[in-house]
């Protein structure tokens, strides 16, 4: 309850500004104008702190946060299909989805039980979105994630573009910034719903947003 209360307080406020500079483990791309940092205290910690930053000219200022977050139950590190690590590094944020509608400038897909994220390492659709009715999909559905059946955690979510260009089979799939259920994740980053809704309104594809996880 304490985490939800903090999230609601943050989301109710206007975006925060300050003259702090993000200490990044890896430099964001030169064209990135928005940056979300996710910091775990140690590599094996399943909790982290998320902060959003915006760049004006050559300077970064805080835009939102800090927000308590959950990451993979194995912490932050090298992701794969056999671990529950949240992938360390800098990754673009280019699209979003959710069971519910959302106010965002990112390309946004409202998902149903016919929307999947493919985690079948033998499939040519590995680590991509695919639409097919349950029972008719051209991949192992048991190795996929039915986005519409996930419940409140996927009310809204932002896709983390890890292992997408190029896609390496087995290197890990289906990494999202989504709504927390108060527990560690299988590798995603999860925050309270009011905070995620505020970040979705803030994210602007014209500013090439990225997430840096360490």
Image (cartoon, rainbow, N blue to C red):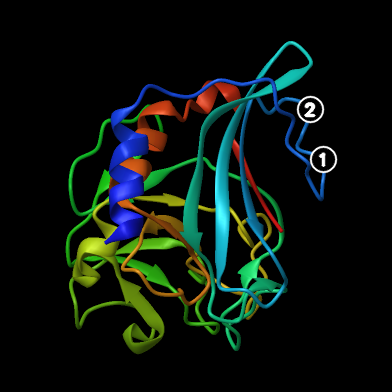
The reply, left or right, for residue 23 in relation to residue 211 is right
Label 2: state its secondary structure. Answer: loop
Residue 97 has which mark?
A: none
Q: Quadrant of residue 164?
A: bottom right
Q: Which mark is residue 27?
A: 1
Does residue 107 appear in this view?
A: no
Toward which corner of the image does residue 20 lie, by quadrant?
top right
10 Å crowding of disc 2: few (<14), some (14-19), many (20+): few
Secondary element type, mark 1: loop
Circle 1 crowding by C-alpha within 10 Å: few under 14, some 14–19, many from 20 = few
Q: Position of residue 114 (x, y in %)?
A: 20, 65
Q: Of tags 1 and 2, which is closer to the observer?
A: 1
Q: Residue at x 34, y 46 (%)?
A: 7
Q: Which quadrant of the rendered structure holds the N terminus?
A: bottom left
Location of residue 144 with respect to 175 vertically, above or below: below
**Residue beneath disc 2:** 30
104 left or right of 79? left
Residue visible at 28% across and 50% down in the picture? 5
Image location (x, y in percent) of residue 54:
61, 24
Image quadrant occupied by the C terminus: bottom right
Judging depth in this view, the residue of 145 and 195 nearest the camera is 195
Residue 156 on image: x %, y %? 29, 50
Q: CA distance from mark 1 to mark 2?
A: 8 Å
Pick whichever, 69 or 132, lies toward us.
69
- Residue found at x 46% / y 75%: 184
């Amino acid at each position: 309850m304490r985490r939800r209360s903090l999230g609601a307080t943050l989301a109710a406020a206007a975006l925060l500004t300050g003259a702090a500079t993000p200490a990044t483990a890896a430099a964001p791309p030169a064209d990135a104008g928005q940056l979300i940092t996710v910091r775990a205290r140690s590599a094996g910690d399943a909790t982290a702190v998320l902060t959003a930053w915006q760049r004006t000219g050559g300077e970064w200022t805080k835009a939102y946060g800090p927000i308590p977050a959950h990451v993979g139950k194995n912490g932050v590190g090298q992701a794969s299909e056999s671990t529950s690590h949240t992938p360390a590094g800098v990754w673009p944020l280019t699209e979003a989805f959710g069971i519910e509608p959302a106010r965002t400038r990112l390309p946004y897909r409202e998902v149903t039980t016919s929307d999947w994220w493919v985690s079948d390492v033998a499939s040519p659709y590995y680590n991509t979105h695919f639409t097919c009715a349950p029972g008719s999909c051209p991949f192992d559905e048991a190795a996929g994630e039915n986005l519409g059946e996930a419940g409140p955690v996927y009310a809204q979510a932002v896709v983390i573009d890890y292992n997408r260009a190029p896609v390496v089979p087995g290197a890990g799939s289906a990494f999202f910034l989504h709504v927390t259920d108060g527990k560690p994740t299988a590798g995603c980053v999860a925050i309270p719903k009011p905070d995620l809704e505020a970040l979705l309104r803030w994210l602007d594809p014209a500013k090439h947003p990225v997430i840096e996880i360490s």
